[in-house]
Image (cartoon, grey):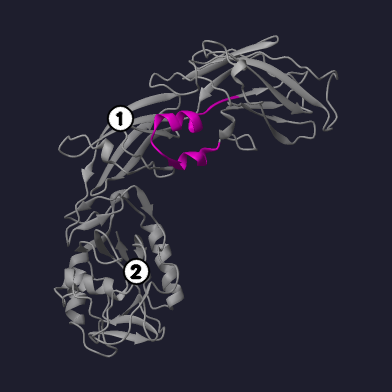
Amino acid sequence: MKQILRFLGIAAFVSVGALTFSCTKLNDETEGYLPLQDDNIVTLTASVSIGVSSRALSEAGVKTFAAGDRIAVVYINTGDETKKAVSDALEAGDIGPDGKHAVFSVSMTSPKPGSAVKYIYPATMANDDGTVNFDALSAQDGSLATLASTLDCCTFDGTLTDEAELPISAGLTNQFAIAKFSVKNDDDSDITGSIRAFLVSDGTNTYRVNPAGLDAIWVAMRPVNDATIFFSAASETDLYSKTVPGKSLASNSIYPINLKMVKSVPVVGHFLNRDGSITSTKQTEGTDESCAVIAYVGAVGHYFDKFVALALEDVYNGGMSMASALTYTNTYAGNHPVMIGGNIYDTNAVSTRYLDFVQRGTDKPSNTYTGEVVKGWRLPTVTDWRYVFMGLCDGPSASDPVGVADWGGYGNGRAFITAINNACGNTAMKETAYYSSSQGGYMWSYRFDRNMFFDYPDNGFLARAVFAY
C-alpha cells in the first residue's frame, strides 16, 4: 500500500494508492527564518484522499478516513529543536462523500526553512522525536479492525522549502509487513478460532497477540530479511510451536499465511526446547536448543498446570548465597528463554526469596502455596523437588502432599543424582545441597549427599532451576 501526497496550492489529496495533498500558509507573513517565538505559528490546510467511508485497512490493502483522524508532522524549528505537530481532528464535514478526500489543518511553530520534515499517519503512531512508535506492535489483539484503527502506519520523509512550506509532493509508504494468519494443527484441522495466545518473534522483535475466536489472526510486524521466525500458540487445552527459517517479509505488503503448527505434548523424560517444542531427543544447537527435561506431567495444586521441567544444568558452577542464587537464576533464564503458550519466559519468575512456607514434620503439607500458578523459570520449591524425584528418579510418591522432617531421611540422594544426570544427558548435577524456594524455620534445601530435605540457614549451596507451566 503505497500512498502519495501531492500539494496543489490550497488543497492536497492523499490516498492509499495515490494520495494527493495540498496546503497553504494562513498566518505566515514573514520571509526567511522565523524567530523562535510561540506566536510564529504557520497553519497549513490540506485535503487528503484514501478509500471508503471510515478509516480502515481492507484485506485488499485499502485505507479510509474517518472523523477523529489526525496526521503528525515532525519538523525542526529555528532553534534546531525537533517538534511534533498534530493536525486538527477530522470532522464529518471535512470528509468527502466518497470517503477518499478530507480537509485538515496543522500548525507548526517557527519551522526552519530547508529542514527535514516527516509525516506519520496516524498521529497516534508518532513519537515526539519523529520516530514511529514500534513499541505499539508488541501487544495486539489479532483483529483487522484494531490493526487498521490503531497500528497500521505510513510515513514520509522530506524537506521544507526555503519558505518553510511543506514539500510540493510526498509519498506515504506503509512501514509494516502485515500478516494474515490461518492456523492449522499437524493433522490439517483449522484451529485459528480456538487460539487464545499467539506469539511471533524474529529473534529481535516479539509480537504478543491475544485473539478471541477470530477466523484469521492479523499481525502488524516490522519487515525482516532472511530471518528465522518463531511461532508459539495456545488454546484452552493445547500448546503449539513452529519455527520457520529464511523468511523475508517486506513493508508495504500483506501476507496471507497458512501456518501449520506442531502440538507440544509434554512427556516425562522428553526435552523442553527454547522454541517451545518438546522432543524425545536433546537438541544441542541453535534457537531450538534443549534447556530442560520434563520431570512431571499434570496439574499440581497452584504450582503448575501442565508440567514441571528441570533445567539441564546448574544456574552457576559453584556455591552461592540465596540472594546470588536468585540473581543467577534470572541470568540463566535470560540465557535460556523459552517461547511457549504465546509468551516468552526469560526471567526468574520468583525474584523474591521464597514462594511458599513448609513446616517441619512428615504430617505437614509441602504444597502450601495458594496463589496463581507462577509460570516460567524459578528455583524449585520442596513440592517441585518432590515431583522431580518422583518423575525422573522413581522416588517416593509426591501425589500425597505430605511434608518433610528436618534431618529426616528422604529417598536416595545418590540414586537421584544418577537418575537426573542420565535424564539430562550429562554429569552436571553434583552430590551436594541444592536450594529450594521454600521457607521453613530457615530455608529448605535438599542434601543429595545425606538423603534429606535440610532446613538450615543460607550456606553456600548450589542452585538448579525448574521451568513450571
Q: Quadrant of residue 145?
A: top left
| Between discs 1 and 2, the one toward the N terminus | 1
The amino acid pointed to by label 1 is Ile
Query: Which is nearer the eye, 176 or 11?
Result: 11
The amino acid pointed to by label 2 is Thr
Q: Is residue 25 magenta?
A: no
- On the rendered structure, is 192 left or right of 68? left
- Where is residue 467? Give x, y as percent: 31, 62
- For label 2, the residue is 370
Query: Which is nearer the eye, 231 or 104?
Result: 104
- On the rendered structure, is 347 left or right of 400? right
- Where is residue 391? Give x, y as percent: 17, 68
- Where is residue 81? Give x, y as percent: 74, 36
- Which type of secondary structure does the marked residue at label 2 adopt? loop
- On the rendered structure, is 363 left or right of 81? left
Residue depicted at 51% across the width and 42% down the height: 135
Q: Provide the residue span drawn in magenta.
A: 133-156
Q: Is residue 141 magenta?
A: yes
- For label 1, the residue is 257
